[in-house]
Amino acid sequence: MTTLQLQQLSVPPGKSILIHDLSWQEFENILEELGEHRSARVAYDQGTLEIMTPLPEHEADKEMIGDLLKALLEELDIEFLSLGSTTFKNSKMLKGIEPDQCFYIQNEAAVRGKKRLDLTIDPPPDLAIEIDVTSRTHPDTHAALGVPELWRRAGNQIQINILNNGQYLEAQTSSVFPTFQIQDVIPQYIEMGQSAGRNKAMKAFRQWVREQIK
């Protein structure tokens, strides 16, 4: 049997590889070897590990959506914790995921100041964001870990999924922002950022939010 070393694997941007029959400890070892400062993302589900490397367009959408959401939370004066692509794991479920972006909002106070999170005892993020440009988004893993709301960016659309009895149901409004038409507004300002520039789009979005609050 031939054993490959992790450094022998190369994943081109926009591609992914699957590694089967991997134990939880081997998954933990790979995470340690990969380190925290890397472009590759991982997802682990009961013995199968996927390693993905996103394209620039994937990262651009991820950053813009995350920035818009931060601006919305700030304008609403809601405390939040943004943890980006932090690895969330549950050893009892044998599942792990690195969302493109994630936020603690309702449960922000429960994890405030913590340096390490363990989903066997800590709550999952309240909201995760996944970009469907280059990789599978693993909604079943997010659901199993108990993430209440998942946004999926596919094409020019934002799909909102709300966890209900262990499964995601597509919804027209966000449970976190029920009075805002997220599906309509977020894509508009992403497009503005692509054409007019990020700063102009962010300023316009903040102004729009303030008008809605009034």
Image: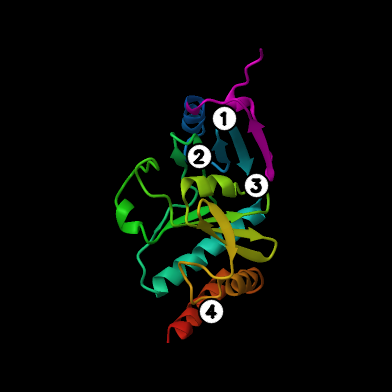
Residue located farthest toward the front when viewing the structure as drawn: 165
Residue range corresponding to the magenta coloring: 1-24
Q: Does residue 144 belong to the magenta stretch? A: no
| Contact (Cβ within 8 Å) of mark 4 with mark 1 | no
Mark 3, secondary structure of its residue? loop
Snapshot colouring? rainbow
Mark 2, secondary structure of its residue? strand
Q: Residues within 10 Å of mark 1 (few under 14, many from 20)?
A: some
Q: Which residue is mark 2?
A: 96
Residue drawn at (50%, 64%) of the image? 67
Measuring from the top left, give residue 57's x and y in whole percent: 66, 56
Q: Which residue is mark 4?
A: 204
**Quadrant housing residue 193:** bottom right
Q: Earlier in the sequence, mark 4 or mark 1?
A: 1
Q: Which residue is mark 3?
A: 136
Mark 4, secondary structure of its residue? helix
